[in-house]
Image: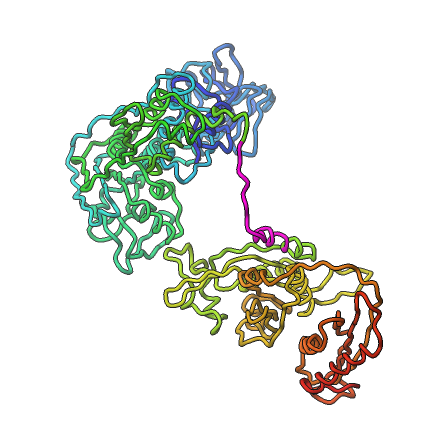
């Protein structure tokens, strides 16, 4: 949020530099994120003064030029001028030699002594556009006769140099959405630390009295969403540009002036934090109704976009149509225009939740919705209306056309909180004087209802929507007292925290480091996704009916909680592919969500994705594509790191909708994941052109299996290993994992490794057959093996392979 230093100082008893305000505001919880010097006119018109034309003669060498002599308050200067309206006796603006003007922001114009048609000129008499004050170039700017020569132009034109302060406003600090809220914190800080007795004083207003006849009937049909609504009409206004002081204030906080009426509403909103809205009273046509929108009702907002309203949207309407989306955005037809003569001014308190839902539903974020969503001060609404109405009368004229309407059927009561002194000292670890505590609270507008030696009974102002409990009040005391004022203890006591082993969080980090070491990059995708993925691509595996839907989605692309990590991983793959990065190794730890018959489920998973080449192109090796078995090797490494590789089993994949083929991974009877490649339909949907291999692992199931893992240590063997090979002719459907399982069952003592070192299919083999070359490695860590021992085991393995798989030795 942007605030103006000059504006803020209207409420402060002493001047504070931007650097001092930075420290002060940050200490009180309003973190300053930056400063920017704001000038009404770029350069501040340095070296530009008021001057008087004392002579004006025709240029001897040019018909359209005049040679003038002007008094700048200290001397008479000769200036050549081409303006048709220059004349003796005029008070004008003179840009002296050395001054720099910015007729265009990026094109500085520096004044210097020049010869124009052989006549020297010591400066320039300026038109409006040359000063950067407007667009008119019809002639020089002629000032009032009482203008004094030598007066700096910036001073005469009431131009200000200001410092814009950017505050990182947290959502709970709704009270600081206007300058008075920020000033309140500064004054509380000054009272606590510098002994200031200054109190926050609002600008004086008077009760609005009817002066003309412009009645408007006001009614509120939904008092839950609009607890308080106030309005008044003003007749006979003159819509025109705002005076300089008002334009300067708005520019200082990043707003562009529009017209005097609208500028007043924006000014009061930035002053008090209370949004207002001005309607053209002739469009209102004598009636204002606060109601919810009708089915199919539409409105064209100020940005020129036609929007279809939802039945939950609150609108401000006349007798025939909606004029404004309440608390969010005004309508294009009912706003103030240059031809408006009568105004209906609105000040209200809208329910924050209602405004937030409407703003999100329509994808709108305005200054008004920003404030209403967080909760404005319902008790400040009458003052805001009076303040705005009187300012409109000051800058646009007009008369109050009706008695003020204030519809507030169910007043919002202030909350009461009990504060114990002992609790304050306990939480802060430091004793604060009771008088200091009371002073801080009263400076923040907390009302002390009663007190004793032990506690205070407090009434919380309604604008502090975030203060409900005793601990909230303690936080208020601490931020004004200052975190830096709490002394550090001489010693720090702590307790040893016992945690269960293994440390599951650390385990996940370790595996992420393992994956990073093998060339993987971590993805972090949103848990919200599009329901179209389940509808179009999920088939029976992922269905929209099982998706957890958002009650108030930000958009249709973020309407449900994800049921799988795969679809967003494919989004990431497509995003990289479209930016010439097709060789990917990606992983993500994330949760999936589902609902079945009202039962909600949450499952943490680990997804690995691999596509493109294994390694970057190099002279030392050929480019080679990643395969399913490349990914399988990575998965096996992970399970080996977890100590579960010995329990891992593979089996044919059950029916899948998103994977074309692959296999399931089990630990005992529990399926812990699936490895396969993404089917063409899914690839086509995301526009991915190459094969994509994924491993979708159930991280919760894997963690539950860790109790089965055993860490064992053994010495290096003293003997040599023995290797034997089989060349097997098998059906093409047989997997190597089946051969390995049969071999492991044949011997569990000296058979150390089973490997596959050659696969052949094709010429000289029957159709439906393939050849596997399988190695078997034997070793006894203590005794040297004999051929008879190994032969006996190999014969058993061969017999079982023939029996169970129909294998033949080649």
Residue 755 place in picture, x, y as percent: 75, 72
- Please tell me in which quadrant of the rendered image residue 518 appears: bottom right
Along the viewing direction, whichever of 91 and 348 lies nearer the viewer: 348
Q: Is residue 736 visible?
A: yes
In the rendered structure, does residue 140 fall within the stretch colored magenta? no
Q: Residue at x 35, y 38 (%)?
A: 466
Q: Which residues are magenta?
A: 493-511
Quadrant where the C terminus lies? bottom right
Q: With 324 as the anchor, is 779 left or right in this view?
A: right
Front residue of 356 and 53? 356
| Residue at the extreme top of the image, as rendered | 74
* Foreground residue among 540 and 97: 540
Residue 399: x and y in percent read: 20, 31
In the image, residue 499 sits, relative to residue 797, either above or below, namely above
Residue 454 x/y as whole percent = 31, 26
Question: Dividing the picture into quarters, in which one does residue 433 lie?
Answer: top left
Q: Residue furthest front?
A: 783
- Which residue is at the front of the view, 350 or 155? 350
**Chosen colour scheme:** rainbow
Q: Residue at 47% of width from left, 25% of height from top?
A: 486
């Amino acid at each position: 949020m942007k605030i103006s230093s000059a504006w803020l100082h209207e409420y402060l008893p002493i001047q504070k530099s931007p650097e001092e305000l930075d420290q002060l505001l940050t200490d009180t919880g309003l973190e300053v994120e930056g400063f920017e010097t704001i000038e009404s006119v770029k350069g501040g018109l340095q070296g530009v003064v008021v001057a008087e034309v004392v002579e004006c003669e025709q240029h001897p060498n040019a018909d359209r030029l005049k040679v003038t002599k002007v008094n700048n308050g200290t001397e008479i200067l000769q200036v050549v001028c081409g303006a048709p309206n220059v004349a003796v006796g005029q008070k004008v603006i003179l840009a002296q030699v050395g001054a720099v003007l910015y007729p265009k922001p990026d094109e500085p114009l520096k004044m210097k002594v020049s010869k124009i048609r052989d006549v020297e000129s010591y400066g320039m008499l300026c038109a409006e556009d040359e000063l950067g004050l407007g667009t008119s170039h019809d002639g020089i700017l002629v000032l009032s006769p009482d203008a004094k020569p030598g007066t700096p132009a910036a001073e005469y034109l009431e131009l200000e140099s200001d410092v814009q302060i950017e505050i990182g406003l947290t959502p709970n600090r709704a009270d600081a959405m206007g300058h008075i809220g920020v000033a309140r914190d500064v004054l509380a800080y000054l009272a606590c630390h510098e002994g200031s007795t200054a109190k926050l004083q609002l600008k004086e207003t008077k009760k609005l009295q009817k002066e003309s006849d412009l009645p408007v009937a006001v009614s509120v049909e939904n008092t839950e969403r609009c607890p308080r609504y106030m309005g008044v009409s003003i007749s006979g206004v003159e819509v025109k540009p705002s005076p300089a002081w008002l334009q300067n204030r708005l520019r200082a906080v990043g707003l562009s002036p529009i017209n005097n009426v609208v500028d007043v509403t924006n000014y009061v909103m930035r002053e008090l934090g209370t949004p207002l809205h001005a309607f053209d009273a002739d469009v209102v046509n004598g009636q204002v109704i606060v109601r919810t929108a009708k089915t199919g009702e539409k409105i064209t907002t100020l940005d020129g976009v036609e929007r279809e309203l939802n039945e939950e949207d609150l609108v401000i309407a006349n007798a025939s149509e909606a004029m404004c989306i309440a608390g969010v955005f005004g309508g294009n037809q009912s706003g103030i225009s240059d031809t408006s003569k009568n105004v209906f001014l609105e000040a209200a308190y809208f329910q924050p939740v209602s405004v937030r839902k409407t703003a999100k539903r329509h994808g709108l974020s305005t200054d008004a919705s920003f404030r209403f969503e967080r909760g404005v001060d319902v008790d400040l609404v009458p003052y805001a209306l009076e303040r705005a109405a009187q300012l409109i009368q000051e800058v646009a004229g007009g008369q109050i056309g009706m008695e003020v309407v204030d519809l507030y059927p169910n007043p919002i009561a202030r909350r009461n909180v009990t504060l114990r002194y002992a609790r304050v000292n306990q939480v802060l670890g430091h004793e604060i004087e009771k008088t200091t505590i009371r002073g801080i609270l009263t400076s923040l507008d907390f009302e002390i209802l009663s007190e004793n030696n032990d506690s205070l009974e407090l009434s919380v102002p309604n604008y502090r929507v975030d203060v409900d409990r005793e601990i909230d009040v303690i936080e208020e005391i601490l931020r004004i007292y200052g975190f830096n004022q709490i002394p550090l203890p001489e010693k720090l006591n702590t307790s040893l925290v016992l945690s269960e082993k293994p440390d599951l969080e650390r385990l996940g980090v370790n595996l992420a480091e393992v994956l990073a070491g093998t060339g993987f990059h971590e993805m972090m995708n949103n848990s919200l996704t599009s329901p179209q993925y389940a509808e179009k691509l999920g088939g029976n595996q992922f269905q929209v009916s099982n998706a957890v839907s958002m009650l108030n989605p930000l958009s249709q692309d973020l309407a449900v909680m994800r049921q799988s990590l795969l679809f967003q991983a494919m989004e990431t793959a497509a995003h990289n592919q479209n930016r010439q990065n097709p060789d990917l190794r990606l992983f993500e730890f994330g949760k999936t969500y589902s609902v079945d018959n009202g039962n909600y489920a949450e499952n943490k998973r680990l997804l690995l994705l691999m596509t493109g080449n294994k390694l970057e192109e190099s002279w030392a090796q050929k480019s080679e594509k990643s395969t399913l078995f490349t990914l399988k090797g990575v998965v096996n490494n992970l399970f080996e790191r977890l100590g579960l590789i010995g329990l891992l089993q593979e089996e044919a994949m059950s029916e899948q909708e998103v994977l074309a083929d692959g296999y399931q991974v089990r630990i005992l009877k529990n399926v812990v994941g699936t490895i396969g490649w993404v089917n063409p339909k899914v690839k086509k949907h995301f526009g991915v052109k190459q094969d994509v291999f994924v491993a979708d692992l159930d991280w919760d199931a894997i963690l539950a299996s860790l109790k089965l893992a055993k860490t064992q240590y053994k010495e290096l063997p003293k003997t040599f290993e023995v290797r034997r090979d089989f060349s097997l002719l098998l059906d093409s459907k047989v997997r190597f994992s089946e051969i390995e399982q049969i071999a492991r069952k044949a011997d569990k003592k000296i058979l150390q490794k089973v490997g596959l070192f050659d696969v052949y299919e094709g010429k000289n083999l029957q159709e439906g057959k393939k050849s596997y070359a399988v190695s078997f490695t034997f070793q006894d860590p203590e005794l040297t093996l004999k051929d008879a021992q190994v032969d006996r085991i190999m014969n058993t393995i061969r017999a079982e392979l023939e029996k169970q798989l129909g294998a033949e030795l080649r």
